[in-house]
Image (tube, coloured by chain):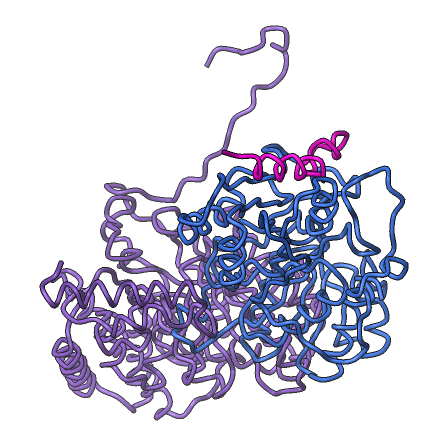
Chain colours: A blue, B purple
Amino acid sequence: MNMIQALNSALDVMMERDPDVLVFGEDVGYFGGVFRVTEGLQKKHGLTRCFDAPLTEGGIIGAAIGMGAYGLKPVPEIQFADYILPAYDQLVSEAARLRYRSNGEFCAPVTVRTPYGGGIFGGQTHSQSPEAIFAHVTGLKTVIPSNPYDAKGLLIASIECDDPVIFLEPKRLYNGPFYGRPDEELKTWDKSGLASADVPTGHYEVPLGRASIVREGSEVTVLAYGTMVHVAEAGIRDSGVDAELIDLRSIVPLDIDAITASVRKTGRCVILHEASRFGGFGGELSALVQERCFDHLRSPIQRIAGYDMPYPHAFEWDYFPGPIRLAEALQSAVEYR
Amino acid sequence: MPNPDPTKSNLPRLELHIPEPPSRPGEEVTFAHVNRGEAGAVRRPDIAVHESEVRDLPYELIRVLDDDDKAVGPWDPKLAPETLIKGLRAMMLTRAFDDRLFRAHRQGKTSFYMKSTGEEAIAAAQSMALDKGDMFFPTYRASAWLHARNYPLTTMCNQIFSNAEDPLAGKQLPILFSARDYDFYSISGNLGVRFVHAVGWAMASAYKNDTKISLAYVGDGTTAEGDFHEAMTFAAAYRAPTILCVTNNQYAISSFAGFAAPERLPFAAKALAYGFPGIKVDGNDFLAVWGATQWAAERARTNNGPTLIEFYTYRAEGHSTSDDPSAYRPKDEAAHWPLGDPVDRLKKHLIVLGAWDEDKHTALEAELKEQVKVAVKEAEAVGTLGQSKPPIEEMFEDVFAEKDWRLKEQERDLKARRAAREGGAA
């Protein structure tokens, strides 16, 4: 299965298990979504289980919150994460706080699926990585898979969880892994040979808040998520440094124990994310590592990230933090004195 | 103003229109624009009526109580006098409660308060007209819903005082209640947001083949928010079993209703663009509110879809304890509202029916005042704002279903500091 099929399978499994799970959003019903993630769900589960929505992100999320308050488990889709801002008020002021402000009387168990990130020449409106603006809002969970196996297991865990979840799908990884080199042929998950591409057809969960160690190493810890996990693999290979690579899988909840254990072991930390650097989630990671691992650090924490500008269409590969920038950071980290 | 472009001197100069209310402080009050119509004159269509046949309705005002305090016309719900007395009691209780708690704010016992004065009939009648299990998505001028259902007054005061027995554990601003057992959804200070939730909730009820419907309010000002239009779009598309209401009390804080809609357009007419019925109802007429709600509820319950109701009313007091309405409207404007006072009108109707008299009314007023007094005293004994607080652990609860390490660490840290302080270490 590729990631699209894995996500489709997660929705299918959950719709089969729980009649309270329903899927809706722009183009998700009859057509099956512009990325085909919801393909066949309407045909199989019926018109009221998977249906199209008006073009109003605020309406989609607002209605989902009401459904959640009733007791359903809605899984709305926002077609691109770039379009989530009209729904930002509903997510921040409502979904994230409903449980708190009602002292537990109501909650919004909504899982918002949305493709995000660059690497597809989508320009400003089809490429952004907005995870930091959600991570800052307490009450929301933010989940970002990097491979089909995790995508399915994390989506199931998100739907089963009683909190509102922003589920960011790295669209560059929908069809296969991506190592950050635009001249490389597009790989498919099926041909990749990665164990993570083997996705069981039935129900399983990848728990939220549990990072995975993609590669063990001794010299430096690399923290990444989403597409950047694969870019990191390439950068580490290029650098020749024995780096430990941690895929965070969710940034809220964050697996702080996995991060601190690794940095205490390696003594160095490089953070890699696709979103703009200033105010990005890398800043939070950096602060946490500094607070908890200061005595173990042998070089300054480094952040490799997108530049601080709207996603520039023609300069995608210059903007996109690629393996070369990471390799340089890794080398400078181990050479630091 | 000099002409900014002399080369276009033959073109008409444009002028920006800024809406202005009919009267300002110091000016004579005028409500000449209010079309009262006639009580009993508006037809009551079949609940399955097609929207195209009722496009004139938003421009009429549905009234039941006439100027002789009699109930007339097809929208009269023909309620038993006992029911009317219950409604009157709920409205009078709301008013007594508002008066007392408003004073409590002035005495520094709470941080904030908002009165429903003049609008009590709306939430009181709807609370009674709808069934247990239907969900109400309220605004902050709808406490009559809770009073009509005998929500404990002391608990209400505890919420307002944010004291140790606040049912919302000190997490919410005063009067932004949440009362699930009373079918009362958590109030958000962000206006309009819950209008969409109500539609989603109704869609969920329909999805589950349930029998429950939802009811939601926005004020006239909030119809300008995107949420209003999102909710209307969703309600129309999915024919959600919901009653969407605009409580047009003429003011959004100080901005008069003309800023949210062209001065002569009823808010009810906004439904026309969405393809479901909109009706305009005298919000100060308990019977008209009930009759209209019943019609809309029947439509919702029989899969005929949503209804938009504009409740035409008047906010007799300030927006909140932080507002001074005399700064933007004539001081005596409220007294001139052409559709009267809802409590007064229902009282007079009951007297006409022979089911009520001035003595009973005075006695009930005194009884309710005393009930509120007792409740406030009970809550004060627990503590007013700052005097007592819910347990500090509560602060960390309900951010998520389960606390993550951040909340656990922060709670541990806060407790350690408090323990140190109490032990004299800090």
Where does the image place residue B229, in percent across and percent down from the top left? 60, 56
Is residue B203 found inside the magenta-colored segment of the image? no
Where does the image place residue A237, in percent across and percent down from the top left? 74, 45
Magenta-tinted stretch = A311-337
Q: What residue is drawn where x is 41% and y is 67%? A: B187
Q: What residue is drawn where x is 86% and y is 57%? A: A192
Looking at the image, the residue that sits furthest to the left is B424
Q: Is residue A87 left or right of residue B122?
A: right
Which quarter of the figure has residue B138? Answer: bottom left
Q: Is residue B177 visible?
A: yes
User: Considering depth in this image, is B173 or B348 the residue closer to the camera?
Assistant: B173
Which quarter of the figure has residue B426? Answer: bottom left
Q: Is residue B52 visible?
A: no
> Which SS type dominates the magenta stretch?
helix
Q: What residue is drawn where x is 53% and y is 75%? A: A69
Is residue A313 found inside the magenta-colored segment of the image? yes
User: Considering depth in this image, is B105 or A289 the residue closer to the camera?
Assistant: A289
Where does the image place residue A173, in percent across and percent down from the top left? 78, 53
Q: Is residue B135 above or below residue B171?
A: below
Q: Is residue B32 left or right of residue B331?
A: right
User: Considering depth in this image, is A101 or A223 the residue closer to the camera?
Assistant: A223
User: Considering depth in this image, is A234 or A88 the residue closer to the camera?
Assistant: A234
